[in-house]
Amino acid sequence: MMLKSAIQLAEKLADVSGKIICQSFRQPYLQTETKSNEVSSIVTIADQKAESAMVELISLEAPQDGIIREEGDNISSESGLYWVLDPIDGTAAFTKGLPIFGTLIGLVDLNKNTTILGIVNQPILKERWLGVTEEVTRLNHQPLINVYAKETNNKLQDACLTSTTPLMFITERQKAIATQLQQICKRTAFGGDCYNYVSLASGWSAMPMVILESDLKYYDFCALIPIIEGTGGVITDWQGQSLNATSTEILAASNPVLHQQALAVISG
Amino acid sequence: MMLKSAIQLAEKLADVSGKIICQSFRQPYLQTETKSNEVSSIVTIADQKAESAMVELISLEAPQDGIIREEGDNISSESGLYWVLDPIDGTAAFTKGLPIFGTLIGLVDLNKNTTILGIVNQPILKERWLGVTEEVTRLNHQPLINVYAKETNNKLQDACLTSTTPLMFITERQKAIATQLQQICKRTAFGGDCYNYVSLASGWSAMPMVILESDLKYYDFCALIPIIEGTGGVITDWQGQSLNATSTEILAASNPVLHQQALAVISG
């Protein structure tokens, strides 16, 4: 599959999922289920419908590709390419009626272990980020500038530390690392999900950002990798290694200097 | 001051503060200060400018009224009326570039201990809630319907529990109560600030809501009281008492039934 075709399909996936999600936003009594084996993890009918629509479109336009997804079983690939889908990242925000969730669409080549592209689509605010490996990330087709990317004097003491929820730090080691970084950074802000990462990529925050998360799945971060890297940000695991399908601990920063300092805290 | 004039002035305050805040949104390197005596509480230049503009307008149009505000000293009242101002509630979201902060404008009569009106203004999304005591709350002039208000069968087990951050629970008693409610409710969602309350008032959430917060100041919740009550929600302190200028622990719910159940958990 050519890159241009892949981008076109990714955009179509964002279009079809976005339409479905907008119909369910701010709808009371929305049908929800608690996932059987995950405490207080909620899946809405919007998640399921949006994912089904994307899966159907892929099976029509790229039947040779596989699918790794949040709400259903994975589909194997003949091409080595996998679409990695999370219809609603930020379900808590979505269920509260806050427009800071996103649809995550990643495309990876698992034979070569490379991420090809990633989309974050916010259908209510009509914001769509597209990251393509080795290209500048775009928001609604406009190239983004992360003004913090080239900073060499940033200190953790000047940064905003972000995690979606403190409940994602499960082990004693994770809790200790999170607490230590919270004490060093200028400010800690919970909430945000994928919106924290696109804010980092967009250089929107009033101060440089460090994002520390754990207990994530591949579909939670795959699409974010080219989006962050495409504006000079850094995203790795807590050991500084490249992310892959089995990673669960994520560290992102507005620039390499902050990323190195956070890694130093993590490794003690 | 007649109610109609008060509403007009409140709307003007939202207009002038909104313009200033929009200019600073998603601006990197935004000037910030850490408040001297509050760890990791950040005030931005936008907070200060927006508040100054509101104070100036009140001194011109209602010089007899007092002001209780976040960023500066209070101003005493000749009329008994006080404007209660928080230019940016949700500074963390604002500094990250997330449009889920709000400007809170309340008007109270401290002689009679009554709240007259409250506005939450979200200038980026152009959403403005107006609550007037004993009237139906309006969003952009349209009356709101909180569909959960009249539910009599709701259980905490069906509700979404929300708190802006777990760090707001400081004492062992507060932490124990928060943890207990988190374990009972269907879902816990952090983040959101004032946006949680307007979502509750608007009946937007996929399931009924309970909001548990502590360590709040008067300007954090004053404007929210008529907005919540004006669509059938309940907002009190953790003992079920009416809120006043010295309250710090807030409990809000989509309806009286859920509120009573949460009070029962709190009182043990």
Image (cartoon, coloured by chain):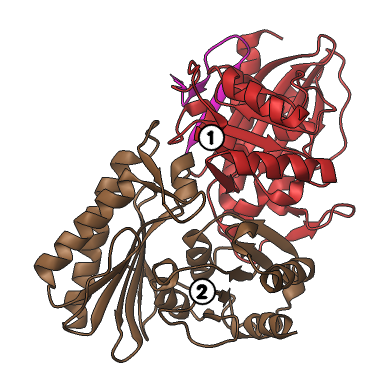
Chain colours: A brown, B red
Quadrant hosting residue B25: bottom right
- Whether residue B8 is visible, yes or no, is no
Q: Residue furthest left?
A: A60
Q: Position of residue B49 (x, y in %)?
A: 71, 46
- Front tag of 2 and 1: 1
Residue holding disc 2: A248
Q: Nearer the viewer, residue A30 or B49?
A: A30
Q: Are marks 2 and 1 on the same chain?
A: no
Q: Which residues are magenta?
A: B126-146
**Chain for disc number 1:** B
Who's the residue at 57% across and 69% down the image? Answer: A214
Q: Nearer the viewer, residue B175 or B101?
A: B175
Q: Is residue A53 above or below residue B132?
A: below
| Type of the residue with mark 1 | Gln
Residue holding disc 1: B157
In reply to whether residue B132 is colored magenta, the answer given is yes
**Chain for disc number 2:** A
Q: Number of numbered discs present? A: 2
How crowded pointer 2 is (Cα within 10 Å; few <14, some 14-19, many 20+) is rated as some
Q: Position of residue A75 (x, y in %)?
A: 22, 71
At mark 2, the secondary structure is loop
Q: Residue furthest front?
A: A37
| Type of the residue with mark 2 | Thr
Does A34 sit left or right of B10 as displayed? left
Spatial CA distance of label 2 from label 1 is 29 Å
How crowded pointer 1 is (Cα within 10 Å; few <14, some 14-19, many 20+) is rated as some
Does B214 sit left or right of A10 as displayed? right
Quadrant hosting residue B185: top right
Who's the residue at 51% across and 48% down the image? Answer: A40
At mark 1, the secondary structure is helix
Numbered badge on residue A73: none
